[in-house]
Image (cartoon, rainbow, N blue to C red):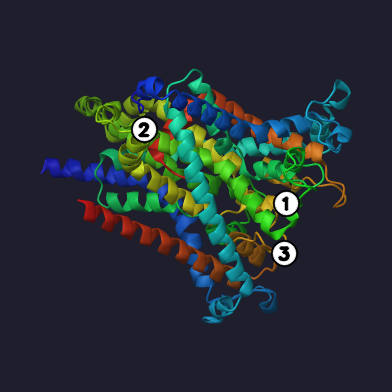
């Protein structure tokens, strides 16, 4: 694996002896970081397991008793609201667009890293600049494309833009990866008579797997989380993705907000990403810093 | 001869490898922007039966006098500046602490990037619930600490609604800033600090004189990306407040979406897209120029 090495700095010993308060400060900052990052999520998890009575009790219940806990909000999501369908839609769109993005982006990244094609600098500049475009600038034009090709309520209406919005990141991350690959391998493959495409497929691709996984995770996250295009191009209930479906969960009246199911929907929709972060934290950080990108 | 031939063939392969990605980028990025620019010279709304009718600069004339547009621009500016300041401050604190050695650092790093990875629309739901007037946990905490006497209607008050969406956005994106800054911190050699400490520098002095200048590039990159995303913020606002109350949190993106999807005013929506795009490009471009000049001066 020739991915970016994770440097670990040695302990800050200068602070330890002469400034014991530096250590206290550090632990305060760490405690802040953990509480800051987790509290809103944990609150949502707790809410999702509380009964309606416990949810609307004041003052707020922080430690619900057993009789104040329920699993019914989750059951409601799947029985009353077809959340399995939204999950399926989100997963399908995210996975297909991620695979497509890697398939289109890595060859382009290789060409930009190694083949010295004319106009290379301009291409790279374009790739860098478009990562700055907010999606709101694109949705009007894309809406026309979707209409012109009759793609509304078709998975392609999301797969195509999701593939494209992840291409800049893929190209930047993969390019920096290819630049770190030893050139000798490719040279000897050429001596053995491989042409560029054969060499990419048989020699370079197998070595690229770790970088592909890193990039793929990021692309999947962006696709799973996208809201604007999903909101605009998918109006039919059976085609909606998780973020849109969850945001549109509503009661029958303004005063009948389904707090429990809303919290459960948030948990269900974020769970796949929480798992990704738990298992691939280092890869995500690597990808973000080497592709450096958007927030 | 053969060398030229090989080189030419390599270039042709290179272009073939780049072409599919390039076509897709042009379709999804270049076409919509150019199309919006073109359409902004037409009136296309319910009064024209959604047919484009050329109307010159009418849309732009309307835009200049459109109080709602200027209000949304002001809101966007306030939101962007404040979120960037808080994200940089908090991101720096988190990055600095994650750069130290301590037990369980891997776990804390995992926890710290969590907010960034979660879907914004769902996070907006979570924050809407936290800021709920009657049952929200934030009011409960403040009441228990006796910081407020009665529940605050966070999302129903123009001022507090802006505070609430800023807080939610800061929560969501600080980790992104922290990740980028941490990468910068990790690339600084420890020897520098040791030498500096031997010279009698305090930690604060080393922070000012070593850390900040050396992570300046990461700060600039993080802020640039955050600026563009904050400026075009949509999902968080749409789900949390819908731009309300009374337009108090209506950002440019929310207005654009309403112009197109609710009022079906495609021509005017296109003009809004064009102007927003130009403002974004101008600010990024000016920052770029300023940085280039700054760098030229220091060299």
Query: Would residue A275 be found to the left or right of residue A16 on screen?
Result: right
Query: Would residue B155 be found to the left or right of residue B214 on screen?
Result: right
Q: Are marks 1 and 3 in contact (CB under 8 Å)?
A: no
**Which labelled disc corresponds to residue B203?**
2
Label total for image? 3
**Which labelled disc corresponds to residue B154?**
1
Up-down: is A6 above or below B230?
A: above
Tell me the crowding category of disc 3: few under 14, some 14 to 19, or many 20 or more residues within 10 angstroms, Cα based. few
Q: Between disc 3 and disc 2, whose residue precedes?
A: 2
Give coordinates of residue A23: x percent, y percent.
46, 24
Q: Nearer the viewer, mark 1 or mark 3?
A: 1
**Residue B288 in view, yes or no:** yes
Q: Nearer the viewer, mark 3 or mark 2?
A: 2
Give coordinates of residue A164: x percent, y percent.
49, 47
Q: What is the secondary structure assignment of the residue under circle 3?
A: loop
Residue under label 3: B246
């Amino acid at each position: 694996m020739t991915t970016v090495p994770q440097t670990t700095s040695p302990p800050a010993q200068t602070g330890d002896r002469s400034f014991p308060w530096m250590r206290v400060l550090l632990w305060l900052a760490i405690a802040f970081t953990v509480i800051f990052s987790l509290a809103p999520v944990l609150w949502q998890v707790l809410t999702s397991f509380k009964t309606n009575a416990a949810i609307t009790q004041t003052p707020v219940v922080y430690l619900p008793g057993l009789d104040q806990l329920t699993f019914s909000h989750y059951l409601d999501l799947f029985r009353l609201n077809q959340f399995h369908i939204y999950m399926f839609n989100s997963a399908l769109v995210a996975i297909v667009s991620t695979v497509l993005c890697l398939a289109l982006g890595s060859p382009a990244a290789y060409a930009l890293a190694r083949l010295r094609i004319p106009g290379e600098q301009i291409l790279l500049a374009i790739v860098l600049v478009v990562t700055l475009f907010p999606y709101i600038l694109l949705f009007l034009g894309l809406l026309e494309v979707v209409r012109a090709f009759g793609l509304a309520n078709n998975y392609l209406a999301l797969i195509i833009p999701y593939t494209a919005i992840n291409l800049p990141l893929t190209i930047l991350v993969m390019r920096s990866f290819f630049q770190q690959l030893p050139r000798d391998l490719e040279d000897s493959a050429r001596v053995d008579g491989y042409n560029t495409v054969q060499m990419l497929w048989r020699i370079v691709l197998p070595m690229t797997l770790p970088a592909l996984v890193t990039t793929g995770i990021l692309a999947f996250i962006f696709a799973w989380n996208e809201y604007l295009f999903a909101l605009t191009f998918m109006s039919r209930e059976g085609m909606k993705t998780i973020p849109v479906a969850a945001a549109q969960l509503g009661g029958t009246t303004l005063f009948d907000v389904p707090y429990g199911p809303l919290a459960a929907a948030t948990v269900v929709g974020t769970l796949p990403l929480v798992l990704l972060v738990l298992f691939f934290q280092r890869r995500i950080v690597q990808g973000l810093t080497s592709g450096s990108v958007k927030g | 001869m053969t060398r030229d031939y090989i080189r030419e063939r390599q270039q042709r392969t290179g272009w073939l490898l780049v072409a599919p990605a390039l076509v897709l980028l042009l379709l999804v990025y270049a076409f919509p922007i150019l199309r919006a620019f073109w359409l902004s010279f037409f009136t296309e709304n319910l009064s024209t039966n959604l047919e484009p009718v050329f109307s010159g600069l009418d849309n732009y004339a309307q835009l200049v006098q459109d109080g709602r547009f200027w209000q949304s621009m002001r809101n966007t500016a306030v939101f962007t500046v404040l979120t960037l300041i808080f994200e940089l401050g908090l991101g720096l604190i988190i990055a600095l602490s994650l750069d130290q050695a301590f037990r369980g650092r891997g776990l804390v790093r995992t926890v710290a990037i969590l907010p960034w990875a979660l879907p914004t629309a769902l996070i907006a739901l979570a924050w809407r619930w936290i800021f709920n007037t009657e049952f929200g946990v934030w009011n409960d905490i403040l009441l228990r600490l006796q910081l407020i006497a009665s529940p605050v209607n966070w999302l129903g008050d123009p001022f507090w609604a802006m505070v609430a969406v800023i807080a939610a956005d800061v929560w969501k994106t600080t980790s992104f800033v922290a990740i980028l800054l941490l990468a910068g911190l990790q690339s600084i050699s420890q020897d520098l600090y040791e030498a500096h400490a031997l010279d009698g520098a305090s930690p604060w002095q080393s922070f000012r004189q070593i850390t900040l200048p050396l992570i300046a590039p990461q700060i600039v990159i993080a802020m640039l990306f955050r600026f563009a995303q904050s400026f075009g913020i949509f999902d968080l606002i749409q789900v949390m407040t819908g731009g309300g109350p009374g337009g108090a949190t209506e950002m440019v993106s929310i207005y654009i979406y309403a112009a197109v999807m609710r009022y079906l005013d495609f021509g005017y929506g296109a003009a809004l897209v064009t102007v927003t795009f130009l403002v974004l490009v101008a600010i990024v471009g000016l920052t770029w120029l300023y940085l280039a000049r700054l760098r030229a001066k220091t060299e």
